[in-house]
Image (cartoon, rainbow, N blue to C red):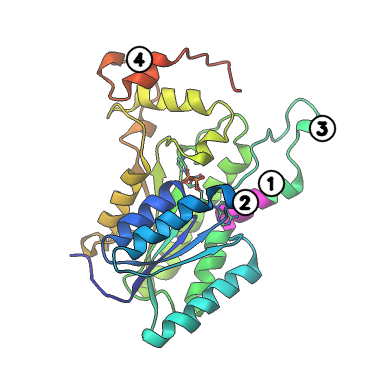
Amino acid sequence: MTRKDPKQWALILGASSGFGAATARHLAHNGYNILGIHLDRKATMGAVEELIEDIKSTGHSAIFHNINAADPVKRHEALDDFVDNVHREGRPEIRVLFHSLAFGTLKPLVGRSSEEMITKQQLEMTLDVMANSLIYWTQDCVRRHLLGRGARIFAMTSDGASLNLPFYGAVSAAKAALESYIRQLALELGPRGIIANALLAGVTDTPALNKIPGARNMLIAAIAKNPLSRATHPEDVAKAVLTLVDSGADFINGNIIGVDGGESKVSYIGQQNPYQYSDLRLLAESSWDPTDVS
Ligand SMILES: NC(=O)c1ccc[n+]([C@@H]2O[C@H](COP(=O)([O-])OP(=O)(O)OC[C@H]3O[C@@H](n4cnc5c(N)ncnc54)[C@H](O)[C@@H]3O)[C@@H](O)[C@H]2O)c1
């Protein structure tokens, strides 16, 4: 049974879109208050307001901060604000820390010329936001006694941690680091009763995916090879999180758990009749050109 504690909170890093937003919604509908961190401009703030209203309509609290999660001052402010304002109702306990930040430089590491080469600043920023920030947020939650026994840490990874793609070198390195951090957190926090796992999602149609050159082809290829005949949806991950926060999952620790319908286990496509795919329209409408990375 999932513990229903009216004071339980989920800290979602990357709460406004994709996996983070879907997980925030699902957790709120299943007994969690949401502390959401996101980075949005005016154009996408309408969707953030809708998400906050949806969370509040469940009777749970939603505290959202539109900040750069990699900024240490902003991180401290957000966590201090949480302690100051939520503490009045009793000891605030974050039961779920979900890392789902997508903010990296998509450039060749070396490329064809100096101009194409990723810079030191871009490489370090990508690793800082997409990997190191998991450690800094975890440290600061532990320092404030916000993560207690039974707490769960999740970080979103992809098969890009072990397979390489054009333009994905920096993000790929960040994913490999993130997976290593999860194993280390599992080791170091296990004695405190806190468990940590990485979730490996399949290709999912989100704003982050659509920034990768050739994203459309990636999506089509993913659908074509997925044993379950469709792409991953953000809700697939949200439902997996709900399952993994259950006390029945409290011995699952230090893993990379695929939430991709088996997509990452299949290395070729075309083995099935394309007309059986549920995302058929996308396949049928496509004039797939694997050399096109525009
Ligand atoms: N979309 C995919 O196909 C896919 C597959 C596997 C893993 N992932 C991983 O899942 C994670 C989330 O990706 P998504 O597809 O849901 O992306 P998304 O673009 O839908 O959402 C990204 C979220 O991160 C927030 N964000 C970005 N930079 C931030 C910053 N500096 N500070 C605070 N918030 C910031 C955004 O506001 C947004 O809420 C990423 O780590 C991504 O690599 C994505």
Q: Is mark 3 within 8 Å of ligand 1?
A: no
Residue at the left extreme, as displayed: 1
Residue 127 falls left or right of residue 139? right
Q: Which residue is mark 4?
A: 270
- Mark identifier at residue 114: 3
Rendered image quadrant of residue 7 = bottom left
Mark 3 Cα shell of 10 Å, populated few (<14), some (14-19), many (≥20): few
Q: What kind of residue is marked 4?
A: Gly
Residue 162 colored in magenta in the image: no
What residue lies at 55% left-to-right and 51% top-to-bottom? Answer: 177
Mark 2 lies on residue: 127
Q: Earlier in the sequence, mark 2 or mark 3?
A: 3
> What's the CA distance linking mark 3 and mark 4?
39 Å
Tell me which label, 3 or 4, sits earlier in the chain: 3
Q: Looking at the image, which residue is at 57% across and 33% down?
A: 212
Amino acid at circle 1: Leu
Q: Quadrant of the C terminus?
A: top right
Q: Are marks 2 and 1 in contact (CB under 8 Å)?
A: yes
Q: Are marks 1 and 4 in contact (CB under 8 Å)?
A: no
The mark found on residue 123 in the picture is 1
Q: Is residue 100 visible?
A: no
Near-viewer residue (250 or 84): 84
Give the CA distance from mark 1 to mark 4: 36 Å
Image coords of residue 127 (percent x, y):
62, 51
Q: Classify mark 2: residues with Cα within 10 Å, few (<14), some (14-19) or many (20+).
A: many
User: Could you say where residue 95 lies in the image, as x and y percent from the top left?
Assistant: 35, 69
SS of the residue under disc 3: helix
Q: Which residues are magenta?
A: 125-132
Question: Looking at the picture, does residue 20 appear above or below residue 60?
Answer: above
Is residue 126 magenta-colored? yes
Return the x and y of residue 216 as percentages of the image width and height: 49, 25
- Label 4 CB less than 8 angstroms from ligand 1: no
